[in-house]
Image: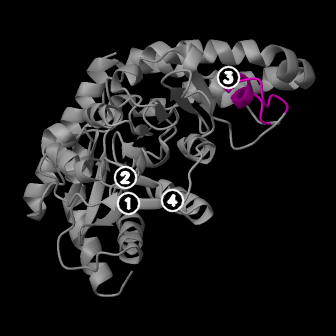
Amino acid sequence: MTVFGRPVRHLWPLHPEMVFLNHGAYGATPWALLEAQTHWRRRMETQPVRFLMDELPALVAEAVAGLAPFIGADPARTVLVENASSAINAVLHSLDFRPGDRIVTTDHVYNAVRKTLQHVADRTGVEVVECPVPMPVTGPNGFLQALDPWLKPPTRLVVADHIASATAVRLPVEDIAVLCRARGLLVLVDGAHAPGQLDLSVDAVGADWYVGNGHKWLCTPKGVAFLVARDDAAMDVNPTVISHAYGQGFKAEFAKIGTRDPSAWLCLPDAVAFHRRLGDAVLRDRNADLARAGTARVSDVLGTRVGAPAELFAAMTTVEVPGDLPADQATALRLREALWTGHQVDALVQPHSGRLWLRLCAHAYTDEADFEAVPPAVTAAVAAVGAGVC
């Protein structure tokens, strides 16, 4: 399939009248994958005991086998979880941090990960350092230069986004991993937005642990994510919920944490097939080209800056919000609400580097008209928030 935009929007149950530029939030699941999930739920409920106790292990293995080639990972080192936060928590809480140790990340880190790092610091006494990389980002070297002074003892772990959620910027995770491994440091990559947005090879990244979501750009039903460990040593990680399989190893422990609905996981092979039918690499290139071109146009009309050079964006970008609204989370939420209630535009607004930034996403169902609707909506919403209307 090489048709995109409005002609394929019927494949998703998205409201036809809205301008949906927030795919990066929770993804959007197409009808075909919702139907696949219904199939698995019905099959499970015909005999729940036999399904969950006897059939499920082989079915999960099939789902992982369907995913692993698509993300460039060894299925023997890949486990499924409900979301990227679950996987990141599992890694962080499995490491034996002590007072005086240090964890390094950047100020582009996802806020849920920031809170997890804070919890680990509160519990263990580890120091957490966020290296500032101001927006607009000038290039990949900005991240390397910000991290480099901290890549030495007592640092033990570096946490890096593959594509930062708040700023949409792609980090040079392969180069970060090379630097860290040369200095004996562990690397955890938060690739929540990478599967389905990038031509991904997890093993080529070289991180000790790589985390990704399926329900975002791969469009699975909600509750699909994965954790890939680099080697046997990195597989010494326990899930956050300990259950019957404790002590049986990485794959077994993550497979059995208590009763849960596995139907979304079992849709992974269908999701990969759906992505390939939409165009696979052609789809990813088209989405990135549309997002970059559309954002450049929005930037020109608004007279503001784009968050990074085009090569650091894929299908998700950021553009500066005009005006002088306070660059805080409360104002960002008010502006996002004004865009939605006044204009039916759904896009994330986030503060960074003393400014508000609008994140714009493109998928198969997005077209140029969606981006054309942004400047007048933003201009009106900024005025409304500034006047205290919203």
Tell me which amino acid carries mark 4: Val
Tell me which amino acid carries mark 1: Val
Q: Residue at x 44, y 17 (%)?
A: 70
Tell me which amino acid carries mark 3: Lys
User: Which label sits on residue 251?
Assistant: 3
Coordinates of residue 34 in the picture (x, y in percent): 61, 30
Badge 2 density bin: few <14, some 14–19, many ≥20, Cα 10 Å: many
Q: CA distance from mark 4 to mark 1?
A: 10 Å
User: Which label sits on residue 129?
Assistant: 1
Residue annotated with mark 2: 105
Disc with the residue nearer the chain's start (2 vs 1): 2
Q: Residue at x 41, y 15 (%)?
A: 277
Front one among 59 and 388? 59
CB contact under 8 Å: marks 3 and 4: no
Residue annotated with mark 4: 126
Q: CA distance from mark 3 to mark 2?
A: 28 Å
The mark lying in front, picked from 3 and 4, is 4
Front one among 146 and 328? 146
The quadrant of the picture occupied by the N terminus is top left
Disc with the residue nearer the chain's start (1 vs 3): 1
The mark lying in front, picked from 4 and 1, is 4
Front one among 284 and 368? 284
Left or right: residue 250 compared with residue 380: right
**The magenta segment:** 244-257
Badge 4 density bin: few <14, some 14–19, many ≥20, Cα 10 Å: many
Where disc 4 sits, the SS reads loop
